[in-house]
Image (spheres, rainbow, N blue to C red):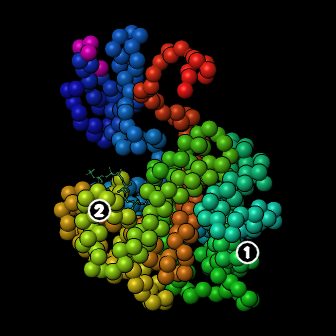
Amino acid sequence: MTDQTATSSSDGQSLTVRDNRTGQDYELPIVDGTIRGSDLAKIKAGDDGPALAVFDPGFINTASCRSAITYIDGDQGVLEYRGYPIEQLAEKSNYLEVAYLLVHGELPNKEQSDTWVHEITYHTFVHENVKTFMQGFRYDAHPMGMLLASVGALSTFYPESSNITDAGNRHMQIVRLIAKMPTLGAWAFRHAQGKPYVYPDNDLGYAANFLAMLFRMSEQRFEADERLIRALEVLFILHADHEQNCSTNAVRSVGSSQVDPYSAMTAGIAALYGPLHGGANEAVLRMLRRIGSIDKVPEFIEGVKAGKERLMGFGHRVYKNYDPRAKIIKQAAEDVFAVTGVNPLLKIAVELEKIALEDEYFVKRRLYPNVDFYSGLIYEALSFPPEMFTVLFAIPRTSGWLAQWLELVDDSDQKIARPKQIYTGPRKLDYVSCQERGG
Ligand code: CMC
């Protein structure tokens, strides 16, 4: 290979590759700082030889799409939605406006905003049979499992959603999903507590209504503290999108089969459920509780360095710097603790962060706190059990998943997702009947 530098987009840039098996040179165009897999496939060891491919488990260095939704600079710790810095959106915007921005590509004007908020609010209720369906879960069902199944079930209530080529139809499903996620999430929460499900209050804003569906008992109207509503809005904004992460990739991968958006969203929820993705904040809380006190922190860190376990809430595939969301969350935590009182686990978290940020193991690997390190502490202060944390991630991420799904559906470059494999198993064996195999 004579030139390994893949620079940014510019006409006429290319990469010259020599195949030392054949001595042949190939010139591969560089577009947007990438080479096309299909161009690499032109390289073969002989006319009939297999096409050269890239082995890249976990897509470490493989772009799966062109996207205009979310920009991340992991080295600098930068996150932007549609070009707007996350810090400004968290400070000045609200979740539904950010959802509009992600889905439509630009901030709404007053009229667009009013229509959007009205549409979302109008669709917060779910069919009564969805309620019956949810009530069928075991008393101790994990709320993420309930959410996953319920969102999948929604496709059966809206069979027209399979017509994904119709823009109006797509818009209706997007509105329904963003509107109904808090209802389903809140009901999954109430279920575990054996409490009656609370219907949406459409006079309340998005986050305020969600809190009311979670916590209302016999009062006529549940009015949460404004500071808590705002903190939840901020958390929702921070979690709304994060480009091609595991769950978004799952939505895009399943969506590439042209299935309805409810089914594609279900794939995203399933991916988010995992402890290395959205389940990490739940894992952080369990970890902090297990450590128990500040004096146990050094011993715990030694265990992590010895490879016994991971420091949950640390490290990120993309951020090799402080996750910008973690900084904002730290501030939100202070706002919430001002209302609820300080979570005693905070001290352990702060000590862990302090030691880890100075320790060579973490410094060398560029492991910094990610969004999940402090979010669990806030959720716990808001009276959520750890099982609910991932639900609180899935609700706002819905707008990001849908924006990505919409972009996929409209992208003529996209094809059904179908990675290659390197086959390592046996071949051309002769079948032997069970009797002859003995044993
Ligand atoms: N604690 C200890 N060591 C770690 C950690 C950690 N949290 N994360 C990475 N490492 C080490 C890892 O052992 C490896 O070391 P070595 O080179 O000696 O083998 C090195 O750092 C690189 O790790 P990796 O697993 O190759 O990195 P990755 O990009 O594949 O993994 C990650 C990213 C987020 C899965 C990982 O950092 C991790 O497991 N973190 C803990 C779970 C967590 O907090 N997840 C939430 C991610 S943010 C929310 C979201 O976007 O979903």
For label 1, the SS is loop
Residue shown at 44% from the left, 72% from the top: 285
245 displayed left or right of 311: right
Which amino acid, mark 1? Tyr
Is 22 included in the stretch rendered in magenta? yes
Q: Is mark 2 within 8 Å of ligand 1?
A: yes
Q: Quadrant of the C terminus?
A: top right
Circle 2 is placed at which residue position? 304
Up-down: is 223 above or below 232?
A: below
Is 367 included in the stretch rendered in magenta? no
User: What residue span does the magenta drawing correspond to?
Assistant: 21-26
- Visible residue check, residue 98: no
For label 2, the SS is helix
Which corner quadrant of the image does residue 179 belong to?
A: bottom right
Residue shown at 49% from the left, 88% from the top: 340
Q: Residue furthest front?
A: 439
Which amino acid, mark 2? Val
Residue 104 x %, y % = 57, 56
Callout 1 environment at 10 Å: few (<14), some (14 to 19), or many (20+)? many
Which label is found at residue 329?
none
4 displayed left or right of 389: left
Residue 387 x %, y % = 55, 68
Image quadrant, ligand 1? bottom left
Callout 2 environment at 10 Å: few (<14), some (14 to 19), or many (20+)? some
Tell me, yes or no, whether the two marked residues, 2 and 1, touch with CB atoms within 8 Å. Answer: no
Circle 1 is placed at which residue position? 197
How far apart, in angstroms, are the residues tagged by discs 2 and 1? Answer: 42 Å
Which corner quadrant of the image does residue 364 belong to?
A: bottom left
